[in-house]
Image (cartoon, grey):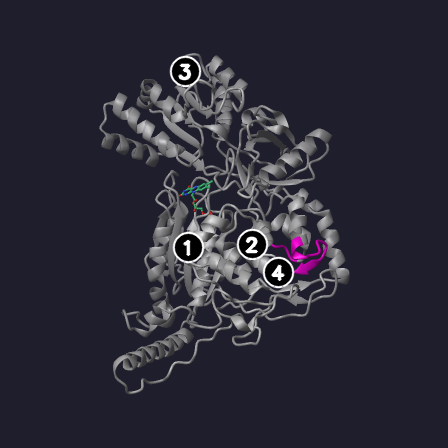
Amino acid sequence: MGLGGVSLVVGGLVGGFLLRRKKIKAKKPSTPSGSANTEGVATSPGSASSVGSVGAGAGAGANHGAQASSSQSSAPAPAPASAPAATGGSALLAQMKARRAAQSSSAKKSSSNLKAKPVFVLYASQTGTCREIAKNLAAEASTKGFQAKALDMREVNFDNLSVATHPVLVLVTSSTGDGDPPDNAAKLYTKVRKKRPASEKPFAGIKYTSLGLGDSNYTRFMHVPRQFNKKFADLGAESFYKSVEADEVDGIEPIIEAWTEDLWGALTFVVTGEKPAGAGDAAAAAAAALPAVAAPWPAQLPCVKWLSGTEHDTCLSTEAKAPARDAIQYRDPKGMYSPDEPFFVTAPITCRYLTAGGVKGVNGRKVMHVELDVAGSGIRYNPGDAVGVSPENDPSLVDSVLSRLGLNADATFMCEGIPHVPCPCSVRHVFSHCVDISGALKKSLVRSLAPFCKKAEERSRMAHLASKDGAKDFEKHVANHDGLLQILTAFPSCAPPLACLLDALPPLAPRLYSLTSAMCDDGERLSAALSVVEYAAKDGTSRRGVASTWLERVASASSSSSSPSGAIGVHLRKSAGFRPPVDVVGSSVIMVGPGTGVAPYRGFLKERKFALTSASADATRGDWMLFFGCRHPEEDYLYREEFEKHAADGTLTKLVTAFSRVDGQPKSYVQHRLKELGKDVNAALARGASIFVCGDGAGMAKDVRAAFADIMVTHGEMTGGEAEMALQKMVSDGRYVTEVWCDEAHDD
Ligand SMILES: Cc1cc2nc3c(=O)[nH]c(=O)nc-3n(C[C@H](O)[C@H](O)[C@H](O)COP(=O)(O)O)c2cc1C
């Protein structure tokens, strides 16, 4: 989970997806603060304002008047129906023309069949990668002529999921936490896993395939994709194409690209009933031909209806009062809350800096300890659990984006069917709370924006960035560098309507932080340690993480004024496996946690200390070893005093530190210290110690695992193969548990 520090995974962008072509009807200019009108409504194929060729299409948005450019509508010249009798070069040319004509007519014939059944790309996504892939898949399917739509699992109701409504499904799913479902999939996941008689087959007739994303650093690798796969089959759905798993450790792109290549033929067969027998077959040709049709389905943006009069006033006053009193008073009987139904913390938040330099930080780093009072919530947590908070975008960034888009912050609108956008809603609310405007740009967003560039040169440049050919340029110039504002600034003629942005911008996801508190010591006070992210972007400007900056702002304001926090919604994410052993006194534990990866161990140790105080003098005591790493003992040694106390009073049998930036000393990391203390580590393992590894996963988790294997070989008299098998057994027994994240994307 997000855990000690930054909770973002670098989005595995899949290159090679084609431009989504949208047909946007030119609308009357809207009056954001006033009269009711709509934007983003689709036209039928062939309408005057239809978008032109793939890669350079233009649409006219409601508010912004991007002109449909007929010069971009490069319809192919009709091919002759039959080849003229000729010889030599002209005969060859004629044959080629004839072949093209035949292909074009078979593609046309099939492309109408391709709409025989809708295809839904149903995604479960926590950090946006599956969402991005699903959107790209649906876009490519649409350009190929399928009626394809990317669908958020939150939009699907189990009871309405049947062959009649969703005949063909492509599942794109991931796991989060410790093999937990992403938030948007939680409801469907629970429903599909519910025990029911084997004869109950509500999904009978549904054809499906599945793409699972995961990371083999995690103990419960691919747990959610595998569960979905199995449960869909148990419920009667039939696989129409091989399912595939893409492991981030190996790199997901090649696996997905290869899987996608053959997906189209399989989809063609399942939708049209025509066998894609091989080369020359009409259906296969149609599936391979790009683009087969003029108007992908759904050729439609969500419908935005601007509000005026009483509706407008009511919406604004409701938002001003939010969260509503009854929402604040909401109590879950089991103390289980969710991002949609959080517990509202109204008591002042307390915070302090764990790194040197206070609010200024040290050498560009700053870690903050935050405490949230959840008295009366009924929340009961264990060490290893995480607290989720729904952040708010930086108000100054919201203002800049709205100003660039020419949108009135106080305008209100209705827009149904987007799960993360309330209806009705104000422009300020949606840009502050609902959509991610500061995360690294995804290709699907760039693709959606391109048609709204008024200048043809910008339009084709942006379209290129989103195309397969532009993959390298995208990686070089856009990915992980730019946010929404940067790309809008770089393409000044881009004027997307609100409907486009609501459709394309990712939801502003809740962030999860490992709890550093323990019920036995802190009761209903949840605490977490979080890195406040600030970094210099490629263009030299300073960028800040959304959630950590927001929490720092709210927490500092709250603790300095001792006033209520203004109601922050929180929920608990239970951990399945990352928790101390039941016998915290007698069991042995090796905890590895560099940086904010040490956060959950604070709770582990509080629990152990509490148990030790009531343990009998002759009770067996296990070894508890903590390996902590940071840059410098005077800079970022988190919870130093507390851990040293635990070492002094025997709660910890060994506190081992690794410092990487101490003048005159060689860089030392946790994996080095593990090996240096290999004999003791091996002795603890021999006594049945469990291993916990938590922290930034880029390389650390792998290196630590290699260090354990090395220790087993050096001190445990095992061969390399035996050590690997022993570690695998520990993983499957739940005795080697990892919780890793990747903060490379800097967007927390
Ligand atoms: C906090 C966190 C927890 C994760 N837990 C698991 C896990 O238990 N099993 C697994 O196979 N992958 C796990 N992953 C890897 C994700 O499934 C993988 O990064 C995926 O690409 C994320 O897709 P999404 O962005 O659509 O959520 C985890 C990733 C993160 C950031």
* Dominant secondary-structure state across the stretch colored magenta: loop
Residue shown at the point (58%, 26%) measured from the top left: 522
Q: Nearer the viewer, mark 2 or mark 1?
A: 1
Q: Residues within 10 Å of mark 4 (few under 14, many from 20)?
A: many
Kindly tell me whether residue 130 is visible in this rendering: no
Q: Mark 2 highlights which residue?
A: 505
666 relative to 513 in the view: left or right: left
- In this view, the residue farthest toward the front is 89
Residue type at numbered disc 3: Ala
Kindly tell me whether residue 229 is visible in this rendering: yes
Q: Nearer the viewer, mark 4 or mark 3?
A: 4
Work out whether 198 lies above or below 539. Answer: below
The quadrant holding residue 218 is top left
Q: Which callout, 4 or 2, points at the residue further toward the start of the chain?
A: 4
Q: Do the numbered discs 4 and 2 sit on residues whose CB atoms are within 8 Å?
A: no
| Magenta segment boundaries in residue numbering | 404-423
Residue shown at the point (56%, 51%) measured from the top left: 507
Cα gap from disc 4 to disc 2, whole angstroms: 15 Å
Q: Which callout, 2 or 3, points at the residue further toward the start of the chain?
A: 2
